[in-house]
Image (cartoon, coloured by chain):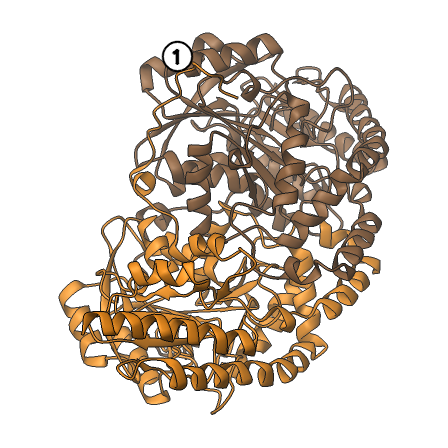
Chain colours: A brown, B orange
Amino acid sequence: MTKPGDKVLDYNFSDRCKNLEGNAIREIFKLISQPDIISFAGGMPASQALPKDEMRVILNSLLASDIATSLLQYGATEGYVPFLKEGAKYVEKVGIKIKDLSEILAISGGQQGIDLTFKAFINKGDRILVEAPTYVAVPHIAKTYEAELIGVQSDDDGINLEDLEKMILEHNPKLLYIVPTFSNPTGRTIDVEKRKKIAEITAKHNVIVLEDNPYGELRYSGECLPSIKSFDNKGNVIYLTSFSKTISPGMRVGLAVASEKVIRKLTIGKQATDVHTTTLFQAATTEFLKQGLLKEILDKNIPLYKVKLDTMLKALAMYFPSSAKWTHPEGGLFIWVTFPKTIDVAGEIFREAINRKVAYVAGNSSFVDGSGRNCLRLNFSNATETDIMKGIKILGDLLKEKLEGVC
Amino acid sequence: MTKPGDKVLDYNFSDRCKNLEGNAIREIFKLISQPDIISFAGGMPASQALPKDEMRVILNSLLASDIATSLLQYGATEGYVPFLKEGAKYVEKVGIKIKDLSEILAISGGQQGIDLTFKAFINKGDRILVEAPTYVAVPHIAKTYEAELIGVQSDDDGINLEDLEKMILEHNPKLLYIVPTFSNPTGRTIDVEKRKKIAEITAKHNVIVLEDNPYGELRYSGECLPSIKSFDNKGNVIYLTSFSKTISPGMRVGLAVASEKVIRKLTIGKQATDVHTTTLFQAATTEFLKQGLLKEILDKNIPLYKVKLDTMLKALAMYFPSSAKWTHPEGGLFIWVTFPKTIDVAGEIFREAINRKVAYVAGNSSFVDGSGRNCLRLNFSNATETDIMKGIKILGDLLKEKLEGVC
């Protein structure tokens, strides 16, 4: 509304926002929306895996039913009761037994659960432990609470327990954020024994665990594992899951499970932001669960994803320089590639990759200390097999050129 | 997951959340979900006004179209571009001219815009001016940012400009929150001259104005007025609107309009919470706007609401004690009733009203200094005319009993 010549206000933004840049992935999201880019950057489910016909039938049926009006009306912040009930059954798969619906909350995508947890627990200057590397949104969200993030060493089998206990003793953190199954960004899965130990160590030191499980259903080999939450005897674990990777990210529906006291605080925090998660999509998700449609979709989509994963692993073996190492995940959406420390894939190589129309996420966004410029995260779920072969070859060629350059 | 005998953690919640109680309205929402209660408490549109058939047809058509998949996929935090374009046209009605889509953001209901604005501007201890009385969610949201709220006197024609300038000089606030059209809770509307003055005074003192307009479309008499934002020459006004009262609250879709710099900060804050507003409902709202359906719905619903308002005004005149005064709004959802200072409608009378199966919101939740126990907010949009007559009679009888009691 300002006109030429008007003196515009010099905004006095809050300390938390003053120097806050956009979340790296979200910014890349805009970049890669160019149609001719082969993107290994996002964390999106395959477009062909999204159940548009099932969703159309379900929404149509819900809006033709006698509860249609209530699904368009304001709902309780706690969530739509039939959804919470189905959600309680759904998490049994990872060993979580919910005694009462006061232990579960509908959230607007899994990520909102991270925000609400930090809101409930984090004061300015409080410390949060994260795996090194961690999910890139977490440092961004943590900055909005002016928290200090501390990286815990992550090995081939996931978080290093000795380093975890050491960091707890050294930094007295309030919280540990962890993705134990098909981690973002590494694709690694933590085994059962280690899950028990994480529950034990954190309980002993009164550290809250925020266990994020958005990818667990996308398993292409191996067995489903019990959650860290299933070993929680002290009420210190908060479990998050999401239907973004299995039904639809666009609908923004997830679940948080925790003790009643914690869920109450998350709920009060949620009252103060989006009031409640869209009721119609909570109801639609309920139908996907109740009618067994989620299982049907997964049965159909998992073979698709497995082919994509195998294709990328094959392409990496064919085209990437021999000095590169990468993870071999049993599920999820990501492969993590590590180069010798001398290679920087976050700067010129990244820009050149974009010039050659291939996108990835450089590893440094996943480390809180700025390291990881020799690593990259590759998403394999959203490109066609042809594009995976083509894109990995382009990247491999580029990397080999640069490697020769530094030799 | 805890078992009997386990020692549950003594949670160390954040300062902002430690003593935070639930938002008064949200708590009442649970209470009034008993089916036999006549509720004048919420701020819900009439259930019969919700366009379930139109929504069904639109969603069905969107999910059968060739953009169906993209509507279920992740979207940009900034919003769905066709929605932002329609939104830009939509706000022209209140005199807002958007030069670029970087000045508009899709939000998950109008209330999220309050949260995002506070996140972008408010440090602990910062002061926010609100009308006395104000929308009850605002003190709740402000507490999650540890802000200090200062009430500005509100007269029959809305906020008192002398008191506004006095409070600005006295308290050096960062922000003024105001609902200039059919205010929540009073139903009052501020005239054009005063809107201009508010823009001038706040610009002069570098105070951000958060102008919230969720009810503006629900006008039953009088003329549509230009927004405060339309008089903003300095980029200090943020305008919020919502489709909750006109299309559906359950879908959680609203809009924020501000200068590009401010929208960028709100966007970065939104990245850190729900990532983006549900794409399918942004697309559905686009269709409601583009096809002229919103206008059709309003043409159909406004006469319904007008009858409800007139019925409540009539019932108040018939049944309420003569010492009560109330507002005569030209639109919106609320009537505000004021009793002599000796009457306390927030305590025993409130509980007795609930016993007699009638609910309202006591005025004290709308004042930051705990005053207003002699006031109540009545919502007229969600009860039938019969129930309005019946409920107001019950309340009137109760109040008369109590008034005789104190005489």
Task: Give the image location of residue B217, x and y in percent.
Answer: 53, 79
**Residue at x 48% of width, y 10% of height:** A161
Q: Name the residue type under label 1.
A: Lys
**Residue at x 36% of width, y 60% of height:** B352
Task: Give the image location of residue A352, x and y in percent.
Answer: 64, 39
Task: Give the image location of residue B204, x and y in percent.
Answer: 24, 75
Tell me, yes or no, if residue A334 can be seen here. yes
Along the line of sight, the residue nearer the viewer: B209 or B76: B209
Q: Which residue is mark 1?
A: A204
In the picture, residue B137 is in which quadrant?
Answer: bottom left
Going by the image, does A127 lie left or right of A198? left
Label 1 resides on the chain identified as A
**Residue at x 57% of width, y 46% of height:** A79
A73 vs A17: above or below: below
Task: Give the image location of residue A147, x and y in percent.
Answer: 36, 34
A294 vs B390: above or below: above
